Image (cartoon, rainbow, N blue to C red):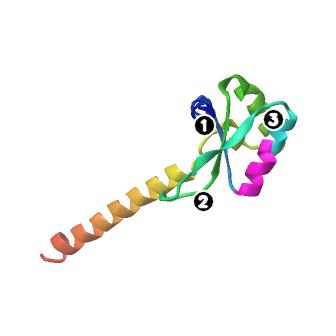
Amino acid sequence: MSKMNDVKLDMNRVHLAYAPTEDDADAMINALKQAGVTAKKGDGIRDLYAIGDPVGIEILVFPKDLDTAVAVLQKFSGSAGAQGKEPDSRKKAVTWVAVCVIAIAALLFVRVVVLKQ
């Protein structure tokens, strides 16, 4: 029964931030704990199969603690990542993939249409 309560409790947590390493995640959680915020690492890892930033460890908190936790991590890291925002690298990667696809299509067009004449 206790395990079921733990599962329900975890489902009520919300995303706070991603830590780049386990050590960073532990440091963030300790800073949050010192401020009276209960935090934990998420079960999964981020961007395992995606182009962009390396894998990160998700930090989760209860919704009632979110504002306090954001303030703590802003002081802790001084970065926008503390607000749980994804970095722009994924958008950049998608843009570069689109540019490459268009460039390849243009080269194929030149090869097929222009060079055959």
Looking at the rendered structure, the kind of residue marked 1 is: Lys
Q: Which residues are magenta?
A: 21-29
Looking at the rendered structure, the kind of residue marked 2 is: Pro
Residue at 85 percent across and 32 percent down: it is 35
Cα distance between the residues tagged 2 and 3: 24 Å
Q: Position of residue 32 (x, y in %)?
A: 80, 37
Quadrant in the rendering for residue 64: top right
**Relative to 33, is 65 on the left or the right?**
left
Q: Nearer the viewer, residue 58 or 79?
A: 58
Q: Nearer the viewer, residue 31 or 103?
A: 31
Q: Which residue is mark 1?
A: 3
Q: Is residue 44 magenta?
A: no
Q: Are marks 3 and 1 in contact (CB under 8 Å)?
A: no
Q: Are marks 1 and 2 in contact (CB under 8 Å)?
A: no
Q: Position of residue 103 (x, y in %)?
A: 35, 65
Residue at the extreme front: 1
Quadrant in the rendering for residue 16: top right
**Label 1: which secondary element:** helix
Q: Position of residue 107 (x, y in %)?
A: 29, 70
Q: Which mark is residue 72?
A: 3
**Relative to 22, is 13 on the left or the right?**
left
Characterize the magenta stretch by its predominant secondary structure: helix
Residue at 77 percent across and 50 percent down: it is 26
Of the 4 image quadrants, the one containing the C terminus is bottom left
Residue at 72 percent across and 56 percent down: it is 22
Q: Position of residue 53 (x, y in %)?
A: 59, 57
Packing grade of label 3 (10 A; few <14, some 14-19, many >=20) is many
